[in-house]
Amino acid sequence: MISEQAQSSFNHIFKSAVMSNFSDYYNDSCEIEPITDPKEITEAEFSVLTITTSSFRFLTLLHFDSNESTTKYFSNNAIEDDEHTNSNVFIDGILEFCNLTCGAMNRNLNAHFSYSGMSTPYVLTRPCLDFVYDLESGYIKHFRITINLNLVLHATLYICNYDDVDFAVDTSKADESTGELELFQ
């Protein structure tokens, strides 16, 4: 069983990580709102972020399309004539964002769970989604993410629990901005 308090904490950890990465790292506006109808999620691909403890596996799926607006955004407008190069820059951008987000979520979870491990984010296509939903979950939540009022992505939190999960995050503290590399000369 995953308590309501833990569900709320997972939601807060996810939203804080996404919001801070879009506003701090990308310097953009971001709105996140829960959705009740998963049929709204129609994107062709998704990135998987996994954080695992002895009590649960916390999967975060970031759903996206490889359309022009999403490609431009995550490749920082570095569009070239070579479609293969554009695809690589775009996927690298999505995976870097996911890696920063997963790291922020893991740091927040480490305050409550001593031993957690996170995977490297990876991308799957929509037909793989059915296999994810076949996992036994204790909690599923869907979100719409709107960036700069015009780019819409979706996310799914999917938590498989192996034991009772109950914890609470302090929502009054400001989130730390960490994880970026600094180069010293």
Image: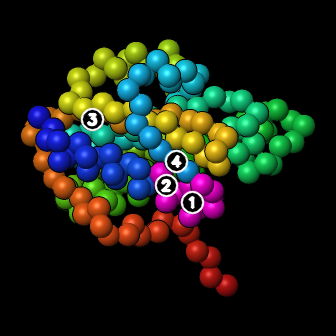
How far apart marks 2 and 3 lie (CA) works out to: 20 Å
The quarter of the image holding the N terminus is top left
| C-beta proximity under 8 Å, tags 4 and 2 | no
Q: Give the mark, 2 or 3, whose residue is nearer the N terminus.
A: 2
Residue 19: mark in rendering: 2
Lower position in the chain sequence, tag 3 or tag 4? 4
Give whichever of discs 3 and 1 has the lower sequence position: 1
Q: Residue at x 58, y 74 (%)?
A: 182
Does the residue at mark 2 contact the one at mark 1 (Cβ under 8 Å)? yes
Q: Nearer the viewer, residue 83 or 176?
A: 176
Earlier residue among tags 4 and 2: 2
* Residue at 72 percent of width and 29 percent of height: 67
Q: Is residue 163 left or right of residue 168?
A: left
Magenta stretch? 18-29
Q: In the figure, 30 relative to 70: above or below? A: below
Residue 148 in picture, x, y percent from top left: 65, 49
**Residue at which label 4 appears:** 31
Residue situated in front as seen by the camera: 160 or 152: 152
- In front: label 4 or label 2: 4
Q: Would you name the residue on which mark 3 appears?
A: 159
- Give the spatial CA distance, label 4 vs label 1: 10 Å
Mark 1: secondary structure? helix
Q: Residue at x 52, y 41 (%)?
A: 145
Amino acid identity at mark 4 = Glu
Q: Main secondary structure of the magenta part?
A: helix
